[in-house]
Amino acid sequence: MLAPSRIIRSTPAQAGGGRDRDALIQKAHDAIEQGSRSFAAASRLFDRHTRERVWLLYAWCRRCDDIADGQDMGGELSTDGDPAKRIRAIRLLTQRAFEGLPTADPAFDAFGLVARECGLTREMAEDVIEGFALDAAGWRPRTEMDLARYCYHVAGAVGVMMAVVMGVQKADSELLDRACDLGIAFQLANIARDINEDDKADRCYIPVEWLVQEDIEPGQHMKPHHRQELADITARLIRRMERHEAMARVGAAHLPFRSRWAVLSAARIYGAIGREVVARGKAAWDHRVVIGSAAKARHVAAAFWEAARNRPKVPAEPPEWTRGDILIEVRMAGPVAPPSFEPLPDEFDGQARQTEK
């Protein structure tokens, strides 16, 4: 009667850790509404089936970002705790989600559900997690390819996962390349807009070689006397953004209408952010660039007609960075901190195990 098999019961593996699907979708919807108004607006254009899955994936991305930075829905960065432990928690909770085990965190359970439904892989997830690991390690890009690698991890790899969620086959490398282009375009716009906020958090995503070319001293790029040089660097970022944005439009042509409309709406909104940063020149960081509700509505309407015509032009100048080249660099570089299989940090382990009882 005291045999271990009689008293120890393993937790059954279930998609979403056994949580109700509708409840996970509602939690994921709340996360995207709080975390990103731009993505929330674009996500409403998907058909219901795709929209729900997009929300589930977004919830995981948002939660990983918050854990990695000690934030709440993208708020102020925290310097408390050990960043390496946070990354380990993300990896282990994601591992549990893939195994169908409860995590005590709806965002990770949501990821387990959408991963099971759409066939997302652990390698895809690890490519995204590596972006958080780079930030946790205080990593900064030295070269353009370093910047490409970072943009891939934090956004291009997410674009690949989003494409699979939209129904793109994992074997369709051409469409996955275009989805990666869209994610990279978004990230370049974010980097240009958030230079000031990143500097306050002791982060900088401008390649060191670019700063050297502009004669900007280390750590001095936000000083007033370097505003023109910084504006020039920003223009350089946005030129790259526009190349990736144009290639993403070519890929969007192969998506169903509603998915195409949503993707083109997001591309227009983020493209507008990047171009507004450039238009403001030296004053770009006096106030954070935002796209208001009325302007978003105009971009969504314009994207509707663009999706309906569905005649994108192949850009005369394709992006200098390709997903294939970036992946070669990524695999050669290896993870900044190899995955650990040590137990979860206490603050996460107690919650996860409570759900197994």
Image (cartoon, rainbow, N blue to C red):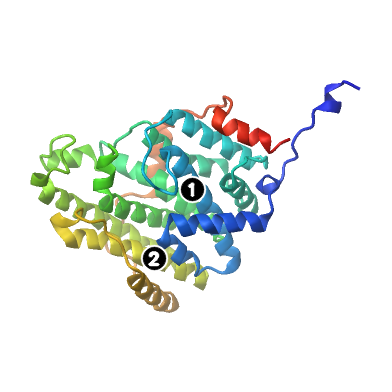
Mark 1 closeness class: few <14, some 14–19, many ≥20 residues within 10 Å? many
Residue 165 x %, y %: 55, 57
Mark 2 closeness class: few <14, some 14–19, many ≥20 residues within 10 Å? many
49 on left or right of 214: right
Residue 305, quarter of the rendered image:
bottom left
- Mark 2: which secondary structure? helix
Mark-to-mark CA distance, 2 and 1: 23 Å
Q: Is residue 31 above or below residue 82?
A: below
Q: Is residue 81 above or below residue 105?
A: above
Give the label, 2 or 1, closer to the camera: 1
Q: Residue at horizontal 25%, vertical 36%?
A: 142
Q: Residue at horizontal 59%, vertical 37%?
A: 95
Q: Is residue 97 above or below residue 334?
A: below
Mark positioned earlier in the residue sequence (2 or 1):
1
71 on left or right of 218: right
Which residue is tagged 1? 61
Of 350 and 97, nearer the camera is 350
